[in-house]
Image (cartoon, rainbow, N blue to C red):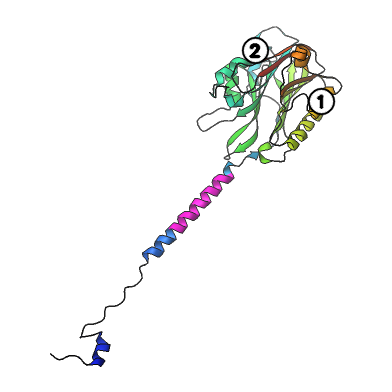
Amino acid sequence: MNCPRPEDLSATGGCGILPVPAPRASAAPASRRGCRLWAVAVAAALVGAAWLASRPRPVASAEGTALEGQDRLGDARPAGGDARVSKALRVATFNIHGGRGADDRRDLDRVAQCLAGFDFAALNEVHGPRPWQRLDQAAELAARLDLAWLFAPNTRTWFCLESGNGLLSAWPASFWQRIPLAHRRERGYRNAVLVGLEHGGRTVRVLLTHVTRSDDASRREQLRAVAELFLSLAEPAVLLGDLNSAADDPEMRRLLAAAGVRDPLGETLGAATPPHIDWILARGMRCRAAGLRDEGASDHPLFWAELE
C-alpha cells in the first residue's frame, strides 16, 4: 500500500480523507433568548399598565339643578308618600360600607330596611356601577325605597370603578354641588356634597361628606374646610356624614362650640351618647328626636334626627 506523502496529509486531513467542517453555531438559542426578552418586556409593560390603572384617581367637581329620579316626587312630599305636609325633616347619615355588613355579607336589602322612612339620607362608602351591575348603589337603594338619589364619587380606579358618597331624598332639590376636598395622599380623595333641599316651602341647605382618615394632617384640613363651609351656609342648614373625628378632637370641639351649632344626638341622649365619628349637626333648626340604629347592615351604626 502506498501511503501518502506528509504534504498530502496536510492538504487532505490525513490518509486521503477530506476534513469534516466544524459545525456552524445554531441560531436557535439566540432566537429563544430574543423571544424570552420580548415576553419579559411585554409582561413588564402589562404589569406597569395595570399598576397605573389600579391607582386611585380623584373625581372632579360637578353640579346640577335636580336629583336623579326627582321628577317622580312631585312638588314635595314627606317620607313614605304621606299626603300631609310635615314641618319635621327626618334625616339620617349612614356609612354603608359598600353594602357589606358586620357579618361580612353584602346585602343592600338590609341597608334599605335601615333607611326606610327617612326624608333624606346621606350615604358614605357607596360603590358605583360594576361590570356585573348596571346601577350604582345609591340608585339601587333609591329603587327599593322609591326615592330620588344622587351618586357623588370621589375616587376612580381602573378607569371606570368609582366610589364615594351618595344621598337619598323624598324631597326635590333646587341645586347640588360636588366639591372635592384637599388631600395629601392619593388614598385620601374625598368630597363634600351641598344640596338645596326644598322642604315645606323652604330651602334647607344640606352638606354631606366623608372625611379621610388616611393621615391626620389631611383629616384635619378636610374637617376644617367642611366646618367653614357649613358655618357659612344660610340657615336652615344640616351637616351629615362620617367625619372620622370623635367629640374630643380639637377641630370637632371648635365646630361644636360655634355659635348656633346644635348636636341633635348629644341633646337627646346627653351623657348616654356613645362615642361616635358619624355626625348630624344643625343650624337654624330645632331637634325633636334623635338616635341610632345598629342592626349589623354595615360596620357603622345609622344615626338619625328629626328636625324642624
Q: CA distance from mark 2 to mark 1?
A: 31 Å
Quarter of the image with the C terminus in it: top right
Q: Is residue 45 magenta?
A: yes
> Residue extending furthest right?
259
Which percent across, then down, holds residue 142? 60, 20
> Element at badge 1?
helix
Q: Residue at x 65, y 16 (%)?
A: 73
Q: Which mark is residue 141?
A: none
In this view, the mark in front (2 or 1): 1
Q: Which residue is mark 2?
A: 117
Stretch of the chain drawn in magenta: 36-52
Amino acid type of the residue tagged 2 in the rendering: Gly
Residue at position x 27%, y 88% in the image: 10
Identify which residue, 148 or 44, lies in the foreground: 44
Residue 261 position by quadrant = top right
* Residue 220 in the image: above or below residue 117: below
Residue sitting at 57 percent across and 45 percent down?
51
Q: Is residue 6 above or below residue 17?
A: below
Residue nearer the viewer, 1 or 151: 1
Tell me residue 55's x, y (percent): 60, 42
Q: Toward the viewer: 194 or 42? A: 42
Residue type, label 1: Arg
Q: Is residue 177 visible?
A: no
Image coordinates of residue 172 in percent, x first then y, are 69, 19
Identify residue for label 1: 253
Residue 204 appears left or right of 111? right
Q: Quadrant of residue 62?
A: top right
Residue 152 vs 269, above or below: the answer is: below
SS at mark 2 in the image: loop
